Amino acid sequence: MTKILEMYKCNICGNFVEVVLPGAGELVCCGQPMERMREQTQGEEMVGEKHVPVISKMENGVEVKVGSIAHPMEDNHYIQFIEVNSLDKRYVKRKYLYPHEEPVLNLKCSCDKVIARELCNIHGLWISEDWSDKDD
Ligand SMILES: [Fe+2]
């Protein structure tokens, strides 16, 4: 049984999917079960700082940056997307990113709190649910 907004990856072909609406079946690709992506919140020294999304409340919404130390955006190592969900999981916004772009997502909203996730092509999926306290 899948759950809404879970992410899965095929370790053979690289297909990467998000569950829009859950079902009872197992997700299979290239003849084998897809791997459920687990969101990371901390890593070894300097890895977490470059990956955990930093959420800041702005005047008209939120800004999400990756991370507290800017993540590289090189041809072979970069953030592939940043996604923001409302806490009630009713709203989703995803921004795809490419090498040499800034790993930032800006969202106009009257959100109270949001969940931010990002995918690094090498270090996997990361999550944050906390406001940064830079404006406090
Ligand atoms: Fe990375």
Image (spheres, helix red, strand yellow):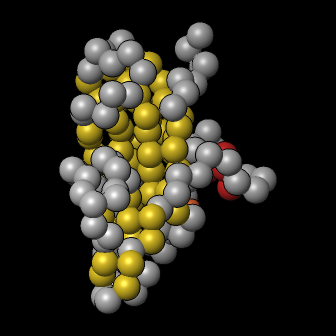
- The answer to which quarter of the image holds residue 75 is bottom left
Q: Is residue 48 above or below residue 120?
A: above
Q: Is residue 81 left or right of residue 127?
A: left
Residue drawn at x 38%, y 65% as measured from the top left: 8
Residue 17 in view (yes/no): yes
Q: Is residue 136 above or below residue 89?
A: above
Residue 12, given in percent of the width and then of the height, sits at 39, 87
Residue 102 in view (yes/no): no
The foreground one among 76 and 3 is 3
The foreground one among 76 and 54 is 54
Residue 32, given in percent of the width and then of the height, sits at 37, 85
Quadrant that contains the N terminus: bottom left
Q: Is residue 25 above or below residue 113?
A: below
Residue drawn at x 26%, y 40% as measured from the top left: 93
Instruction: Give the quadrant of ligand 1.
Output: bottom right
How many badges with numbers are in the image?
0
Quadrant that contains the C terminus: top right
Residue 112, given in percent of the width and then of the height, sits at 38, 15
Residue drawn at x 45%, y 71% as measured from the top left: 35
Question: Which residue is farthest left?
Answer: 21
The foreground one among 47 and 28 is 28
Q: Is residue 115 left or right of residue 25?
A: right
Residue 49, given in percent of the width and then of the height, sits at 66, 46
Question: Which residue is farthest right?
Answer: 45
Residue drawn at x 61%, y 19% as measured from the top left: 133
